[in-house]
Amino acid sequence: MLENKNIILGVCGSIAAYKSAFLVRLLVKAGANVKVILTPDGANFITPLTLATLSKNPVYTQYFEEETGVWSNHVELGLWADLIIIAPISANTLAKLATGICDNLLTAVYLSAKCPVYVAPAMDLDMWKHETTQNNIERISSFGNTVIAPANGELASGLWGEGRMAEPEEIVSFLSNSIKKSLPLFGKKVLVTAGPTYEAIDPVRFIGNHSSGKMGFALADEMAKLGAEVTLIAGPTAQKADQILKRIDVVSAQEMFDACTVAFAETDITVMCAAVADYRPKQVATQKIKKQDSGLFLELEKTTDILAFLGAAKKPHQVLVGFALETNDEENYAKGKLEKKNLDLVVLNSLNDKGAGFKSDTNKITIFNKALERTIFEMKSKTAVAKDICTAILKIAK
Ligand code: CTP
């Protein structure tokens, strides 16, 4: 969740500032770009050198660095940030945030920023309990800022009680969870199928197709990045899905059907990207079929059309998306599949478009919605195509 996020860490004057060093390390380890702003009093508790080394960025302490003549632009810093976490925040800075006092770089950046702001207070028990502090907490929360509550424990004063800053690990998981909750597909269960199916002829041979699974895996990854709980049902493929926790590997159309019908009942959004075999051998030989002088006839029977089966069972809140891979009369076939299989969207690939279809890293798609409105996309990487498909799904997801 924190990968590539631009994070400003504000550090105020509190003994808990020593924990900020651990916090920077954890944020950087999670892949975030971290810039630290120390308040003048914060610099009494932890050195800029420590935080600069750990964050791999210069530490900002004031508007104007006298030695270097560098001016730290608070507006630029505020706009750079995807999120601000002030940990520890002192009672003093809390009061400034509550009233708009802006007498140092951190408070100026706070007022300039448009991103979510989190604060992790650290102070002595009586300061924390004071009505003024509690009013300030309420006030900054009412502005949309999030308070990461202090824990109970031994305080620097020797008192025992509430006021200890949350531990760096807790802060990092709090931030990750709240980013996750803000994602557009958070709470949604998504089913994606990918890759080919193999239909056995005998113990060594099968009927298959050229699907690589790249498009389906890119889609599953993108859905997961948008916060969805993804189940990926994959036919035989060498693809890896880093973001997907639940992957079910299948071989045949029947196995894919069985896995899909179980998962579908719980699913909000289903995207059938797999190239499922339409036919399979009626008999699977138990021994390897030996070469004959004459030709070989295989009798094939139809597999179940999984997408059509799910379309017939679909509940009103469920979104169902299918693919249509065509070589001729593409738009009519795609629209026909949308209607016949009761889909919400159909994604058309034409094998006549160079760089579209199986195996390549790119794809060119056209999407039709239920009203048969058409959106044509440029040739793009499969990752970018996956983003376009997700955007179209987000427009109709309930
Ligand atoms: N599909 C499916 N089960 C099958 C065959 C296809 O779920 N047995 C799904 C695919 O995952 C895809 C969509 O149906 O989302 C369309 O697949 P495609 O092969 O393009 O079309 P078919 O409906 O099989 O028709 P045809 O092969 O005649 O074009």
Image: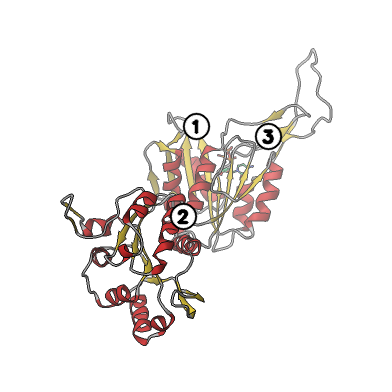
In the rendering, which numbered label is found on residue 26? 2
Question: Few, some or many C-alpha atoms within 10 Å of disc 2 (few <14, some 14-19, many ≥20)?
Answer: some
Residue at screen point 30% across, 60% down:
37
Q: At which x and y percent is residue 367?
A: 43, 46
Q: At which x and y percent is residue 145?
A: 36, 71
Q: Is residue 81 left or right of residue 153?
A: left
Q: Is residue 392 something one can see in this rendering? A: no
Q: Which SS class for mark 3?
A: loop
In which image quadrant can residue 303 be found? top right
The residue labelled by disc 1 is 327
Q: Closer to the camera, 84 or 105?
A: 105
Q: Amino acid at mark 2?
A: Leu
Q: Is residue 264 something one can see in this rendering? A: yes
Q: Amino acid at mark 1?
A: Thr
Question: Few, some or many C-alpha atoms within 10 Å of disc 1 (few <14, some 14-19, many ≥20)?
Answer: few
Residue at screen point 67% across, 45% down:
256
Q: At which x and y percent is residue 313?
A: 63, 58
Query: Which badge, 3 or 1, is on the more N-terminal residue?
Result: 3
Label 3 vs label 1, nearer the camera:
3
Label 3 vs label 2, nearer the camera:
2
Q: CA distance from mark 3 to mark 1?
A: 22 Å
Q: Amino acid at mark 3?
A: Tyr
Q: CA distance from mark 3 to mark 2?
A: 45 Å
Q: Closer to the camera, 294 or 187?
A: 187
